[in-house]
Image (cartoon, rainbow, N blue to C red):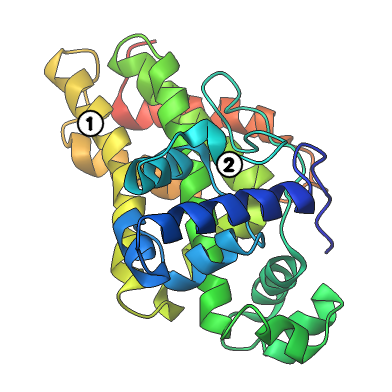
Amino acid sequence: MRLAVNDQETAADRAETGRRLRAARRATGLTLRDAARSLGVSTGTWSAVENGHTRIGEERLHAAARLFRTDPDGLRGAAGPVSAPAGTWRDFPPLRLAPPLAGALDAFVELGYHGASIRDIAARAELSVPGVYHHWPSKQHLLVALLDLTMDDLTERARAARAEGDGPVERFARLVECLALFHTHRRELGFIGASEMRSVDEPDRSRIAAARQDVQRMVDDEVIEGRRRGLLAAPRPREAARAVVTMCTALPQWWSPAGPLTPETLAEQYVGFAADIVRAGR
């Protein structure tokens, strides 16, 4: 598997954004570790952002601007955001990852985290082993960076999808559609998100798990509110919401782009399945 390039953001754009972030951090006297902790990411992930090896989402960029007491527009490189703002959460341009991250994703999907070596990752990234280690101290740092990227992207999309809905039933449907689309269009990221959380060390495991719970809570809240208003009849709304999310996050285990169902067709079907689970009126 080789990940295609999204023309919206070049390596030079990422490098320029990283340079500006690093300068802003240093101007406030914060260490790399301090900034990462305040922004809720691992030190390795924030180092990758500052070195231009991974993108930063709009929400995290604005959080960094607040932390560094600067204007977010002055931090962004030339290309602008590559994650999904409101209204474009259904759009999935080709995934852009720096070569070590692309190689790690490929290796983790094929071999599993524990089965993949840095040599496997380097071969897929078309780099030397020292070339991977130059910016990534360990395989663990690569895994955490991929999971951070996954949750940043999914959370932004879920919030945008939820904001489009009018009332709890419509917001619930938008969230289900979003989850189904993400776990098909971004199936490789979804696959390691489901299969490799057990491989993440603390404190990153708890932090990433909390981000996953935030997405679950969005769905919980709409089902609970729909039940309270009498619009949904699920006797156990929280358990029903968990069943719906689990159904969506399992998609990378079996869905293939070579199969007969497109992500959009599948998402439409899953919205119907989810409505049955929560007993929505049709």
Callout 1: SS: helix
Q: Residue at the location (32% across, 34% down)?
A: 219
Q: Type of residue at label 1? A: Asp
Q: Which residue is mark 1?
A: 221
Give the number of the disc on residue 131: none
Q: Type of residue at label 2? A: Phe
* Residue 48 relative to residue 209: left or right: right
Q: State whether residue 280 is above or below residue 183.
A: above
Q: Position of residue 145 (x, y in %)?
A: 53, 66
Please rate how many residues cluster around mark 2, counting C-alpha atoms within 10 Å: few if below 14, some from 14 to 19, many from 20.
many
Q: Position of residue 128 (x, y in %)?
A: 82, 87
Q: Residue at the location (71% across, 36% down)?
A: 78
Q: Are marks 2 and 1 in contact (CB under 8 Å)?
A: no
In the image, 199 versus 184, the foreground residue is 199
Quadrant of res 71: top left
Residue, far front:
27
Q: Residue at the location (78% across, 82% down)?
A: 122
In the image, 25 versus 85, the foreground residue is 25
Q: Looking at the rendering, in which quadrant would you find the N terminus? A: bottom right
Q: Which residue is mark 2?
A: 182
Residue 196 in view in this figure: no
Q: Position of residue 273 (x, y in %)?
A: 46, 31
Q: State whether residue 270 is above or below residue 135.
A: above
Callout 2: SS: helix
Q: Position of residue 247 (x, y in %)?
A: 45, 46
Measure the alpha-carbon separation of dots 2 and 1: 20 Å
